[in-house]
Image (cartoon, rainbow, N blue to C red):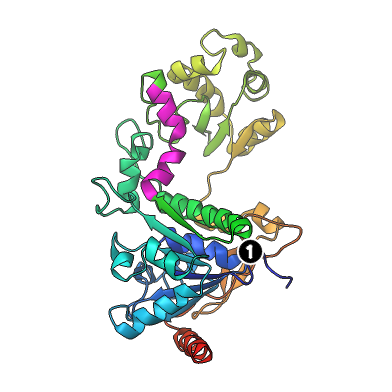
Amino acid sequence: MATLPLQGITVVSLEQAVAAPFATRQLADLGARVIKVERDSGDFARGYDEKVNGMASYFVWLNRGKESVCLDLKSDEGLAALKSLVGGADVFVQNLAPGAVERMGLGPDEAVALNPSLIHVSVSGYGRGGSYETKKAYDLLVQCEAGLLSVTGTAEEPAKVGISIADICAGMYAYSGILTALYQRKDTGRGDVLEISMLEALAEWMGQPYFYAQYGGVQQPRTGAQHATIAPYGPFATADGTVFFSIQNEREWAKFCATVLGRPGLAEDPRFMNNSLRVANRPELHEVINAVLSGLGTAEALARLDAAGIANAQMRDMHEFAEHPQLAARNRWRDVDSPVGPLRSLIPPVTSREQAVRMGPVPSLGEHTDAVLAEINAHAHLSG
């Protein structure tokens, strides 16, 4: 394989669960050496479930390509080993409880003094300072605090997003922040101190509903699988199933009326002439659409939507997703080694003409401890 973009970069990570591991796994895919420091019991995500041939689905997803090193950080020897690793690293990532790395002597100021070219990255729930600094932050709780649940669900009941979206977006900002800092370091020679909070990361993604409510004077409603501010956009029942589709502009609305509904004159109905009117008159709009689609089979409805150039989709469960014809056609699956055998995994979504990615094995707990400690001792011997 050709040289990977981050080959030669060493990342040391004190990480748990989702946010920080998601950031560092992407660095590993790009060729960085990621040394994951775990306690004897391991990252607690190892125990979230046993669905992947005995391993946890979260851990398999987030930790390929890393080296697992077990250290007792309450012992002088373990802490000294960690400081040695950080002293020689390019990036140090941690998402421990507030104050934990400072008590180890590896807070931002201490770590950067030890290694001026270090990029020190802290991922937390709510960030430093303020009354929320020490408040425990789990994904669903941050979804609540960022207002996501106020716009997700039905009119009767809010619903959480079905993935760890607050963790994922924090991990994405940590990942992009690290790449930016590495790029900046090429010019300055200096490291940086980065802080990413789950609340602030998810808050960025809440920008549209914030502006809608702040300046429109009204909160956008929870509308289930229907889009809150665009209509028609969502699921509609057919004679034998459900179709999803989206109308984005008046040209599409006219085509939809003519080709899908067989009612070209409906495009000029004063209740539905633009998106704001369609949203305001959604019950009447749906009544008109349902009157036609309920008499069509799903295959016929999708064929009409395609003929009209209207965006549509099939709602897939995870087994159907795993057999998605487009992912198969683009050869997006690759086996990743693990302690429980090869695991079919998705290739990362950014494709490059110049570079491949490294999808290394998922490590067993402490698999690399002896080798890494031997490196530290050899380096200390040479330095001495």
Q: Can the viewer see residue 236 in this picture?
A: yes
For the point 67% across and 52% down, the residue is 326
The secondary structure type at the circle numbered 1 is strand
Q: Can the viewer see residue 365 in this picture?
A: no
The residue where tag 1 is placed is 333
Q: What type of secondary structure mainly makes up the magenta span?
A: helix
- Please, what is the three-letter code of the amino acid marked with disc 1? Trp
Which segment is the magenta one?
198-214
Instruction: Give the vertical position of 330 relative to 338 (above or below).
Output: above
Residue 364: x and y, percent? 45, 80
For the point 35% across and 79% down, the residue is 79
Left-right relation of 260 to 105: right
Residue 212: x and y, percent? 43, 25
Instruction: Give the vertical position of 334 relative to 82 (above or below).
Output: above
Which residue is most to the top?
Answer: 270
Q: Quadrant of residue 145?
A: top left
Residue 150: say if magenta: no
Q: Nearer the viewer, residue 105 or 260?
A: 105
Left-right relation of 255 to 241: right
Crowd band around label 1 with a 10 angstrom C-alpha radius: few (<14), some (14–19), many (20+): some
Residue 365: x and y, percent? 42, 80
Q: Which of 288 and 22 is in front in this view?
A: 22
Residue 135: x and y, percent? 24, 52
Residue 205: say if magenta: yes
